[in-house]
Image: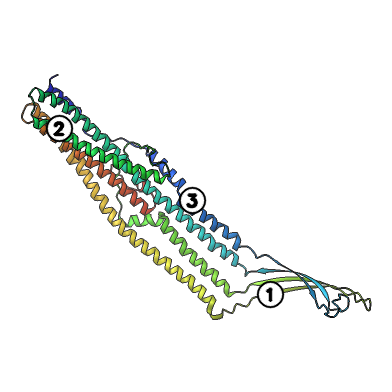
Amino acid sequence: MSLDKTLLFLLLTFPLGGLYAQSTDSDLNVLIAKAVEISPKIKMLEAKQRAVENKIPQQTNLPDPMLTLGLMNLPTTSFSFSEEPMTGKTIGLSQGIPFPGKLGAVEKVLSKDVEIVQKEIDDAENEITRDVKQSYYDVLFIRKKIKLVEESKKLLENISEVVRTKYSVSSASQQNLIKVDLEITNVNDVLFDLKRKEAEQIEKLNSLILDNSEKYIFTDELPDLFFIDFTLSQLDSIAEANRPYLLGLESAESKAVEQQNLAEYDYYPNFNLAVQYTQRDKIAQSNTPLNDFFSLMLGVSIPLNYGGKVSAKVEEAASMKELYEAQYSMAMQMLRSSFGASIAKLRSIEQRIQLTEEGLIPQARQNFTSALSSYQVGKIDFINVIDAQKNLFDVEIKLYDLKTEYLKEVAALEFLVGTTLIDKSKFNN
């Protein structure tokens, strides 16, 4: 095979894209599950939730009864139990009883605390999912770019050998040789930078799963890319139904309502029920036996609302409800702003991806093929072929970058709404 044919063979066998394949995202799901499982933040919140749960039995049961032992009317001159008929030994038992329904109201308030902490856990998982997805997509696409760069480098090194051979027999110019060497140097620089970025993202992923920073992270094939299409009102509805942070604010608002109901019980009395038994000895002087006594007493607190303390407690709960309503509205306002920016960004990236796939890549491939044909018939120098190949390479790298950016923005948007959007979107493959 002649050197020109060898050169053409090398150029023609260079892959012109087509590196995409379906992905099950199995490695991604494993990473997310592990990051959630070992997250110190989630473990902290789970401990907090257990602590809150343990408050419920503490504050929703009757207080301990009170046992009393006493001596009644013991004469100070003799301290005798058989001298005076009023003298006796007493034993009593009393039980505090809140107004009916008050303990149930306390339980409702504390149960809301458990709900609120659960939403904090859910939102922490939501945040971890976003962080893992974004770093994973960075690693995945960087590795695909590395593969493409390494194939380009291999092609250029093979071409370099052919050019050096042609240069040694004066069939190629020194300019051709320098051009190829320069391209190899540029590709090496790109490759070093990509591997640095890969190491950084792997270290970030390993930090999320609390693993050795040098541990290898396995990745799937490139995922199918679906373009999502939502309006602001649709994203609002999805977020209201799914975002744990918003659901937590709703629980906090409900808690304030329950606190107000609980505070209103302070307008009603609490009770104290007591029983007492008095044992008396017979009178020694007359040898007269005395009857024992049994007593039953009911105490009722008088809720006077001194200084408006009860009404202030009710107003405090009402103010907390207004606070959480305003906080919810503020959160939705901020989310709507983020939704608008995210939708605009996704649509822009989508248009650029479509332009690249439908316009730039076909044009770059056509330019590359045309350059090969022109070189084959001697119309242009092979440097023009290298330039056409480099242009195709740059366009494919750009496409990888755009798809990475798109998937990362989808992950960010899914964090904001609190759920995956792919299953809820009209697919535009």
Pointers 3 and 1 in contact (C-beta within 8 Å): no
Pointers 1 and 2 in contact (C-beta within 8 Å): no
Q: Is residue 288 above or below residue 406?
A: below
Q: What's the CA distance linking mark 3 and mark 1?
A: 47 Å
Residue 403 figure quarter: top left
Residue 143 figure quarter: top left
Left-right relation of 74 to 335? right
The residue type indicated by label 3 comes to Lys
For the view shown, which residue lies furthest in the right direction?
286
Residue 299's disc number: 1
Disc 2 marks which residue?
180
Q: Residues within 10 Å of mark 3 (few under 14, many from 20)?
A: some
Residue 412 vs residue 86, the one in the foreground: 86
Q: Secondary structure at mark 2?
A: helix
The residue type indicated by label 1 comes to Gly
- N-terminal of the pair, mark 3 or mark 1, is 3
- N-terminal of the pair, mark 3 or mark 2, is 3
Q: In the picture, which quadrant includes the C terminus?
A: top left
Residue 43's disc number: 3
Residue 86's disc number: none
Q: What's the CA distance linking mark 3 and mark 2?
A: 56 Å
